[in-house]
Image (cartoon, grey):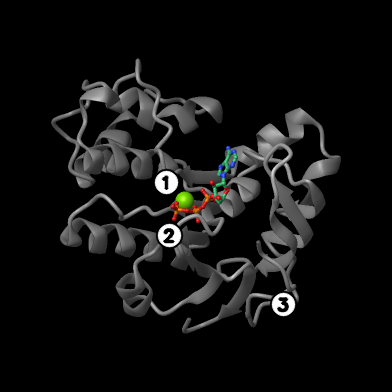
Amino acid sequence: MISKPEQVSSQRTHQEPIVAFDKVSMRYGRGEEIFSDVSFALQPQSFTFLTGASGAGKSTLLKLIYLALRPSRGLIRIFGTDVLGTDRKSLQQLKRRIGVVSQDFSLISHLSVYENAVLPLVAAGQDVKKLARDAKELLAWVGLGDKLHALPPTLSGGEAQRLAIARAVINRPSLLIADEPTGNVDPAMGQKLMRLFQEMNRTGTTIIIATHDAALIKAYPSDCLKIIDGKLSSGSAL
Ligand SMILES: Nc1ncnc2c1ncn2[C@@H]1O[C@H](COP(=O)(O)OP(=O)(O)OP(=O)(O)O)[C@@H](O)[C@H]1O
Ligand SMILES: [Mg+2]
């Protein structure tokens, strides 16, 4: 269970947060509350790690941010919009500004690697043919240049993860949410992906990454939220 309101530190407090939770509680069905009264904010262009033990609630927290779950109680504002008071169409528009790497990758198994990667461009109504070369370059950059026509079930865990990342970043999202994004790749690729995230962050994307990897957090000093013993704490060196 997460409790105790905390604020992620930032010097850009005059701007509207990209994500703001106010006393959010979450339970699945009739189960126990996983979060109670969680409050925090992610400021524009912040880079935050979310950490904590397996089962602590990291993925649940991220799912609330990327609008895959609705909270049991509390207020969530994304890009300044109260998501509980917003109609479906407006929520779809918010979702298009969010890049997501979920823990299970959520790839569409009957679509090819290339078709999966360009889905956010299709959803945003972009001219995909015009952007095909860029899309293929991105896929080559994550090491999938020779897998464009492969189907997700034929990919290795690391390949599927790299595809999920390519899809999440292809449309330059305002907010990138990544759940253990380097968990299945080798250390060299992990560093390459972290450099990509840092570069996106420098050019305006707000980023939150869930990870168990203490070495990763140490290597890239950032804001940090930690779920431990049912509480959410924040700081820069947890
Ligand atoms: N769909 C669901 N229905 C019921 N309980 C769920 C569901 N999803 C997650 N849980 C429970 O919620 C708790 C938090 O799960 P969550 O996946 O958020 O943890 P996590 O911190 O991401 O763990 P991990 O590090 O293993 O990915 C766990 O006790 C889990 O069993
Ligand atoms: Mg998880």
Disc 3 on helix, strand or loop?
Answer: loop
Q: Which amino acid does label 3 sit on?
A: Thr
Q: Which residue is drawn at 35% across and 73% down?
A: 214
**Quadrant of residue 119 within the rendered picture:** top left
**Looking at the image, is mark 1 or mark 2 earlier in the sequence?**
1
Inter-mark Cα distance, 2 to 3: 21 Å
Q: Name the residue under label 3.
A: 13
Q: What residue type is labelled 2?
A: Met
Q: Name the residue under label 2.
A: 200
> Which class describes the residues within 10 Å of circle 3: few (<14), some (14-19), or many (20+)?
few
Q: Name the residue under label 1.
A: 169
**Looking at the image, is mark 3 or mark 1 earlier in the sequence?**
3
Residue furthest front in the image: 31
Q: Which residue is drawn at 63% across and 75% down?
A: 8
Q: Where is residue 109 in the image (x, y as percent from the top left)?
A: 35, 20
Q: Residue at x 22, y 51 (%)?
A: 185
Give yes or no for contact between labels 1 and 2 (Cβ–Cβ under 8 Å).
yes
Q: Which amino acid does label 1 sit on?
A: Val
Q: Where is residue 52 in the image (x, y as percent from the top left)?
A: 48, 66
Above/below status of 72 relative to 17: above
> Which class describes the residues within 10 Å of circle 2: few (<14), some (14-19), or many (20+)?
many
**Quadrant of residue 54 within the rendered picture:** bottom left
Q: Where is residue 128 in the image (x, y as percent from the top left)?
A: 41, 25
- Res 130 visible: no
Inter-mark Cα distance, 1 to 2: 9 Å
Disc 2 on helix, strand or loop?
Answer: helix
Look at the numbered disc 3 and say if its residue's Cβ is closer than 8 Å to ligand 1: no
